Amino acid sequence: FAAAASLSGALDLASLQGLSEREGLMAAVFGERTVADTDDDLVGVVARVDPDALPALYVACGTEDHLYEHNRAFVAAAARNRVACTSTFGPGEHAWDYWDATICDVLDWLPLQRSAVPN
């Protein structure tokens, strides 16, 4: 992959797995398996992989989103481990209004090769 983008993503699954309000969802997805220190633990992944082996990363999350702190934790872990990660945090909830507005920024950011279109 050349790039990966997350809009209000569940990027810190190891922390989410420990929350009682997410217990049913996490059990439905992962069963009894612990996420920490696996490839599903994205905070752990950015701590142990070669930063040059990763695609360009983009993280956006609204400041009123219930996943805001988890997204901030992922971006901080990426920075600690010298993983390039473009991030945008601003007003918004975990809702389509935020994602519809933010996806345009992601599309502008994507490292696409754009060929000249003849007139």
Image (spheres, rainbow, N blue to C red):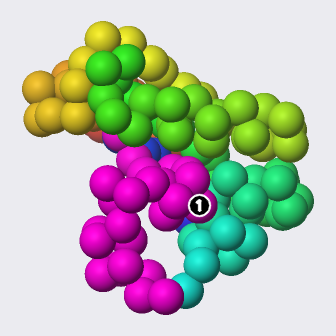
Asked if residue 69 is among those painted magenta in the image, a careful observer would answer no
The furthest residue to the top = 91
Which of the two residues, 16 or 85, is positioned nearer the viewer here? 16
Residue 39 visible in image: no
Locate residue 55 relative to residue 48 in the image: left or right.
left
Residue 78 visible in image: yes
Q: Main secondary structure of the magenta part?
A: helix
Which of the two residues, 11 or 115, is positioned nearer the viewer here? 11
**Residue at figure coordinates x 49%, y 88% from the top left:** 32
**Residue at figure coordinates x 60%, y 78% from the top left:** 34
Tell me the quarter of the picture where residue 28 sits. Answer: bottom left
Q: Where does the C terminus fall, quadrant-wise?
A: top left
Highlighted range, magenta: 8-32
- Percent across and percent down for residue 49 are 84, 63
- Percent across and percent down for residue 8 are 35, 39
The furthest residue to the front = 20
- Percent across and percent down for residue 79 are 78, 33
- Percent across and percent down for residue 9 are 40, 47
Q: The residue under label 1 is which amino acid type?
A: Ala
Tell me the quarter of the picture where residue 7 sits. Answer: top left
Q: In this view, does 101 lie above or below 103?
A: above
